[in-house]
Amino acid sequence: MKRTRRAALVMFAGSSSLLAVDTAGFSSGESEREVTVQVADDPDAYLRLAPYDGEGDVETGGLLFEDAEPRIAPESFSVKNQLTESVTVVLESNEFEFDLVGDGQSGDGEAKLKPGTSVDVEVRPAVDSSGPTNGTIEITAEGDAILIEAKRTLTLKSKEGTYDSDEDTSDSDE
C-alpha cells in the first residue's frame, strides 16, 4: 500500500507542477525582416512616367525631365499604372497646375488608375509669368497595400511670340 500511496502522491505533485508552468503556446512574437527595394528607371517602374509624345530618352531608360532643359508650356507626359492593383494617382505642385485626361479620367491633379491603364497630364504654370517657371512636381500613387512617391523638377517657359504682360495686344490700327 505504501507504494500505491507514494505513486499517487508523486502523480499528484507532478500534475500540480505541470499546471503551475506556462503552456508551450505564446501570445506574441517578433521577427526581423529585410526588404530590398530597387529603384527603376521611369519606363520600367511600377508607376511609369513617360513623355506624352513618346519621344525622349525616358523611353529606353532614365527619368522624366532629367535633362533640366526648359520646356515650352504646356508640357505633357503620361502616367501608367504597371502594378497588379488599382491606385489613386495625385499630382501636386505649388508652381504648376495640371489637367488629366485618359481612360475615362478627366480633372485636376487626381486620377484612379486600374492595372495597365494610363492618364495623360498637361502641366502649365500656376501663375502667369513673363519668365520661366521652375518647380517640383510631387507624384503619389496609393493603393490598398502600395505607396509610391516620386518627385520631378521641371522648368517651363512661354512660347516665343506669346502674350507678355509688357506687350500691347490690341487689334486696333491706330
Image (spheres, rainbow, N blue to C red):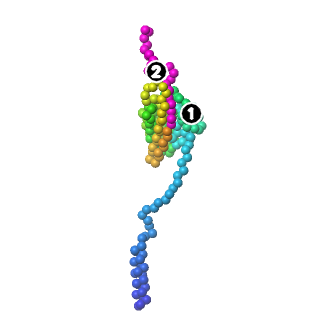
Q: Which badge, 2 or 1, is on the more N-terminal residue?
A: 1
Left or right: 63, with 143 as reference point: right
Q: Which of 173 and 80 is in front in this view?
A: 173
Tell me which amino acid carries mark 1. Asp
The secondary element bearing badge 1 is classed as loop
Q: What residue type is labelled 2?
A: Asp
Q: Distance between the residues labelled 2 and 1?
A: 27 Å
Describe the element under mark 2 as helix, strand or loop: loop
Is residue 75 inside the magenta stretch?
no
Query: Which residue is under mark 2?
Result: 164
Where is residue 150 drawn, in percent x and y?
Answer: 49, 40
Percent across and percent down for residue 159 are 50, 23
Which is more toward the observer, 76 or 115? 76
Is residue 101 visible in the rendered structure shown here? no
> What's the residue at 55%, 35% (across, down)?
66
Label at residue 118:
none
Q: Position of residue 88 (x, y in %)?
A: 44, 41
Q: In which quarter of the image is residue 13?
A: bottom left
Crowding at mark 2 (Cα within 10 Å: few <14, some 14-19, many 20+): some
- Residue visible at 40% across and 81% down? 12
Q: Where is residue 166 in the image (x, y as percent from the top left)?
A: 44, 19
* Residue position for label 1: 67
The answer to which of 141 and 101 lies nearer the viewer is 141
Pick out the residue farthest to the top: 174
Main structural element of the magenta stretch: helix, strand or loop? loop
Range of magenta residues: 152-174
Where 125 falls versus 168 (above or below)? below
